[in-house]
């Protein structure tokens, strides 16, 4: 019986090593870390891209609205200037494999322990020439220091760098309240 994330790690023979603990400590200090490249993603990157491109065409303006349908209006995009998809775990079995991606799972467990819940797998891609996304928090702000953290894992499907845009991070803001 699987009753904890630790059980899953043990069954998959995933053991946290000194590099993982270094990333965990870096995360706790800075609010972010960069995990090692994923073999799972690297080996399937073309298939992930193909699936996402197909879903963007299929879902059109409806992409990203799952779970928020009460706010949806006919042909209103979820977020202007982006392609969005939601609920990817239920749209293709290849996305389910990310639940057991070794590097993500080990570091997340190192940070949160067994107090972990997978909330969603969504997709966001800025459209070329639409400007920068506003700087924002990716969850509800903490009201007190004892609140459980939220971790967002960003997996780029295309090369990103300072010339074509990438995730912007403000280090050490993860402990701010309000």
Image (tube, grey):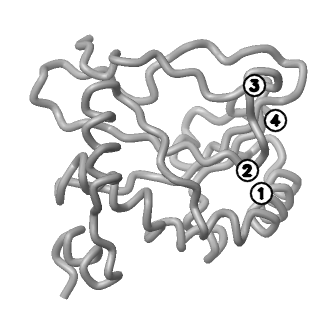
Instruction: Name the quarter where the C terminus is drawn.
Output: top left
The location of residue 46, given as percent across then percent down, is 82, 65
| Residue under pointer 1 | 52
Corner quadrant of residue 27: top left
The answer to whether residue 121 is above or below residue 62 is below
| Residue under pointer 3 | 165
Among the two numbered marks 2 and 1 on one chain, the one whose residue lies closer to the N terminus:
1
Q: Nearer the viewer, residue 81 or 97?
A: 97
Q: Nearer the viewer, residue 85 or 128?
A: 128
Asked if the residue under mark 3 is in contact with the one under mark 1, i.e. CB atoms within 8 Å, the reply is: no
| Residue under pointer 2 | 157
Among the two numbered marks 3 and 4 on one chain, the one whose residue lies closer to the N terminus:
4
Among the two numbered marks 1 and 3 on one chain, the one whose residue lies closer to the N terminus:
1
- Disc 3 from disc 2: Cα separation: 13 Å
Crowding near pointer 2: few (<14 within 10 Å), some, many (20+)?
Answer: some
Asked if the residue under mark 1 is in contact with the one under mark 2, i.e. CB atoms within 8 Å, the reply is: yes
Q: Secondary structure at mark 3?
A: loop
- Any mark on residue 79, and which? none
Q: Is residue 3 left or right of residue 175?
A: left
Q: Residue at x 67, y 18 (%)?
A: 133
């Amino acid at each position: 019986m699987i009753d904890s994330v630790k059980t899953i790690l043990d069954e998959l023979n995933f053991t946290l090593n000194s590099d993982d603990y270094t990333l965990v400590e870096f995360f706790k200090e800075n609010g972010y870390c960069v995990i090692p490249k994923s073999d799972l993603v690297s080996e399937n990157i073309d298939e992930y891209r193909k699936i996402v491109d197909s879903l963007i065409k299929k879902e059109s303006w409806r992409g990203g609205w799952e779970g928020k349908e009460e706010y949806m209006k006919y042909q209103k995009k979820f977020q202007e200037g982006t392609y969005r998809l939601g609920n990817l775990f239920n749209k293709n079995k290849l996305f389910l494999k990310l639940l057991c991606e070794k590097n993500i799972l080990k570091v997340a467990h190192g940070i949160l322990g067994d107090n972990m819940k997978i909330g969603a797998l969504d997709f966001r891609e800025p459209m070329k020439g639409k400007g920068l996304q506003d700087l924002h928090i990716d969850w509800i702000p903490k009201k007190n220091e004892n609140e459980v953290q939220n971790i967002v894992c960003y997996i780029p499907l295309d090369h990103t760098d300072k010339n074509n845009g990438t995730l912007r991070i403000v280090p050490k803001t993860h402990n701010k309240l309000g």
